[in-house]
Structure formats: C-alpha cells, structure tokens
Image (cartoon, rainbow, N blue to C red):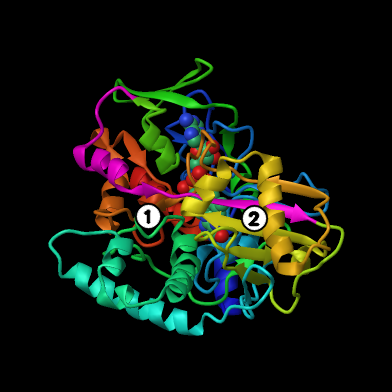
Amino acid sequence: MVSRREFLAGLASVACPIAPARAQSKPDVIVIGAGMAGLAAARALTERGIATLVLEARARIGGRVWTSTSWPGVPVDLGASWIHGTVGNPLTRLADAAGVPLRQTRWDPNPVFAPGGGRVNIDDAAERAEALIDTARARAEAREADISLGRAVEALPDWAGLDHEMRRRVRHVVHAEIELDYAAGWQELSAWNFDDSGDYGGADALFPKGYGALPAHLAQGLEVQTGAAVVRIEKAGGGVRVVTGTGAVHQARHALVTVPLGVLKAGTIGFSHPLGKARRAAIDGLGMGLMNKCCLRFGRVFWPQSGDVFSYLGARDGHWAQWLSLSAISGEPVLMGFNAAVAARDIEALDDAATIADAMTVLRSIFGQSVPDPVAAQISRWGGDPFALGAYSFAAVGSGRETRQALAGADWDGRLVFAGEATHADHPATVHGAYLSGEDAAGWIAG
Ligand SMILES: Cc1cc2nc3c(=O)[nH]c(=O)nc-3n(C[C@H](O)[C@H](O)[C@H](O)COP(=O)(O)OP(=O)(O)OC[C@H]3O[C@@H](n4cnc5c(N)ncnc54)[C@H](O)[C@@H]3O)c2cc1C
C-alpha cells in the first residue's frame, strides 16, 4: 500500500497550479500526440513556463487510453484498462489527484473452460511452461544471435516429448501469461528480451469510471488542438516547422514526437532530414503488437461471479482466450473478450456481426445454448486505426532495451525529440511507461 504521506506528497506535486501558456502562435515546443506521453510532457513543460502547443490527429485526447461513453452510465475502456501494479506507480498518484476511484481486479479464481463447458486443469501445464521457458531462454542466451521464444522452446527435447494435449495446454499458458501481455506471438517475441521490463508492486487496478479521467486531468489548462494530423516536420531556422494535413504550419524550437511506433513505422509523418541511424534501426527493429477487445452487454449475467476473469481453451490457439467480467465494477451484465497476436489479427479482419457471432459461439459452447444474444457490443480495431496501427510495442527478435533507448531522446541536434511508450526502456507498452517517457522528454527539453 502507498502510505498517506506518499499520497499527500504526490498530491502536492501533481495538483500545483500551472503557469498560463504563452501566445499560441509561437510555442517553444510543439508536442505531436495527445496521449499520456504527450500530455505528461506538455504539462511538465507548461509548469516550467515553457510555451507548448499539442497537436492531436484525432477528435479526442487520450490516444490508446480511450474510454467509450457510447453506453450511458457504463464507461468502456477500449484501449488500456489497468494500472499494472499500483504501489509506487505514478498513475496511482495521478488517479488520486484526479479524484477517480480504482478497483482491484480479482484474478483468482480464473477457471479455464473447454468447448462444452468442462473445466481444464492447467496446473501441470503451467509448471511445464515455466520450465520450458526458463530452459529455452537459458539456451537462447548462450547463442550468438537472438531467436524467437517460440523457436527456442520448439527446439527443446522436452517440448518434442510432450503429447498433443499437453502442448495445447502449455501453449494456452504461454498465450495467457506472455502473448496477451506483450500483444505478440511467441514466434515474434525475442527469446532474450521478451519480458525485459520493470514491474510495480501491488494489485492491478481498473477504473470503474473510465481510464480517460487521467488524460482529461492532465490536459487541463494545456493548449491542445484536436483534428490536427501532422504530416511533415522540417528543419527551419534554428528550430522546426510542423505541417498538418489541413495545411496549417506551426513553428517552434522543438518538436516532441509521441505518436505510436506503428505510425512511425508506416512513415505517415515525413521528416525533411534523415533521422539518426540508430533511431531509424530502432523504429524498424522493435515490434508493434496487436490486442483487441470485444465488449458485449447482456440482459443478464450467465457467467461465474466468484472472480472477475475466466479463460477459454478451444481448438485455435489464443482464440477468445481471456474474458473479463465488468459486472462487479459497472453493475451491468457486461463481458469483455480479449484477443492478442495471431488471434487478434484474424478477428480484426471480421466485421462487427461476424466478430459478435464468433464470440457468441465460444460463450454458448461454454455456458450453453440458452445464453442470450448480447443487447449491444463495442469492438476495438487497433491494427487498422491509422493513428495507432497496432496496440503497443514489443521486443521483436533482435531488439530490447537498448533499441528503446535508441528510439528515445533527441535527433536533429536537439530540435526533434521522441517519447511514447515504445521509447521507455523500463516500462514499455504501458500507460505508466508512456507517462514517464513524457516527463523524461520534458526534462530533456527544459534542460
Ligand atoms: C487494447 C489495449 C489495451 C491496453 N491495455 C493496457 C493496460 O491495461 N495497462 C497499461 O498500462 N497499458 C495498456 N495498454 C498500452 C497503453 O494504452 C499505451 O502504452 C499508452 O496509452 C501509450 O501512450 P502514448 O502516449 O505513448 O501513445 P498514444 O496514447 O497512442 O498517444 C499518441 C497520440 O498520437 C496521436 N497521433 C498519431 N498520429 C498522429 C499524427 N500524425 N499527428 C498528430 N497526432 C497523431 C494519436 O492519435 C494519439 O493520441 C493497452 C493498449 C491497448 C491498445
């Protein structure tokens, strides 16, 4: 638990009044992207009296923190859901300063259902998966070059010795414990560095009123232009010129780029001069993963209520493998189904009706044909979202913390600075990592 003194100290630092922004037309810094990284940076810069303008492509702020309000009274987080580890996490302090409640997730019990509704015991598979991963990693580390986690495991005699059923169960554990966390398949993840990130202690917490309260809190008093998609950044005089899709041109001393790795990979933003070699290699080398959510609202609860989650082990790897019940936090019969990596790519290709039908086949297979149709659904498609092009970054084969460090920081003699979750070596792929990367970039710019 965070002590009361820590809470009060946090409140003092977060809630202090910010200096008014200077003239909008001549900012010192243009921040590109109003996600957690961009807003944290803009807030820290503004608090230091540095005039900052935030340009955001979407009609809303928050980026991959996105609370849908389509269902009145039932906020649905279609991007990030959890504060991962509340103790020592800067977001816990921020949530407190914003006055928003948190609710611990009950991960236990987490029954694993088979088609037909029987329970699958995965205790043995979990032990084997752990042993296989440990051995595979040790063997991979002894190699000259990185390989994928999947290849490293599949090369082991212990894997070859497993029968078909045990392999399926081990794959389920790997999917639940690794692929869902890192939004990438084991054939894509680096055996050396797939889990090379720091943790905070304490529980995982959800936002009953929506994660969007955090970006909204950060954005207070900041100069943010939405609907401003940046298409080009140029060197100009001693600073930069930033051009948007509407033809608007803004000048500043620095541009801080916080767009997702997927957007950098796609090259949607043109740079007048080449980026540093290591940074370019980092953009190419890191992976951008995929995870999607399908939120189904029902007329009644038909799933177990003793915990907040249940799992599914069907014929296809990772297919609708994890479900989160939102009934305890929203008071409404709402289920959120997760798909990551290969399963997410397959399902993202389906339209709404086909996605819902696919999910319902699984739920009816577990809980019976009397399960009612959902009364409403909300579905994320982060892979096709032009301002994300994926869910979050992962350590692809050959990449790791040094790759992230090469992506972070300054280019073009300090005029161009990069932040965002993919740049944070200690806490990548998280909201807190994005937030911390924004604060780091602001510190760098402010000197
Ligand atoms: C489905 C899903 C579930 C997740 N679950 C969790 C979780 O439970 N816990 C957790 O900690 N993390 C989770 N994450 C990861 C977390 O959401 C991200 O790491 C974090 O929000 C990224 O913040 P960011 O500021 O780096 O990027 P973003 O939030 O993506 O912000 C970048 C901004 O740049 C904007 N932009 C893009 N292109 C342009 C352009 N050309 N011009 C101007 N603006 C542009 C985007 O619209 C966006 O607003 C999840 C992510 C997803 C997608």
The residue that mark 1 highlights is: 424
Task: Mark 1: give few (<14), some (14-19) or many (20+) Cα within 10 Å.
Answer: many
Residue 104 location in percent, x, y?
65, 73
Q: Residue at image x 82%, y 65%?
A: 331
Quadrant, the N terminus: bottom right
Say what amino acid the circle numbered 1 marks.
His
Q: Is residue 104 above or below residue 26?
A: below
Q: Nearer the viewer, residue 418 or 205?
A: 205
Q: Which residues are magenta?
A: 271-297
Disc 1 to disc 2, how far (Cα)? 20 Å
238 and 263: which one is in front?
263
433 vs 253, left or right, is right
- Please say whether residue 372 is one of the residues in the magenta stretch: no
Mark 1 element type? loop
Q: Which residue is mark 2?
A: 211
Tell whether 89 sits left or right of 190: right
Q: Is residue 282 left or right of residue 313?
A: left
Please state the total of marks drawn on the protein image: 2
Q: Residue at x 34, y 80 (%)?
A: 131
Who comes first in sequence, dot 1 or dot 2?
Answer: 2
Q: Residue furthest front?
A: 163
Looking at the rendered structure, which numbered label has been put on residue 77? none
- Asked whether the viewer can see residue 255, the reply is no
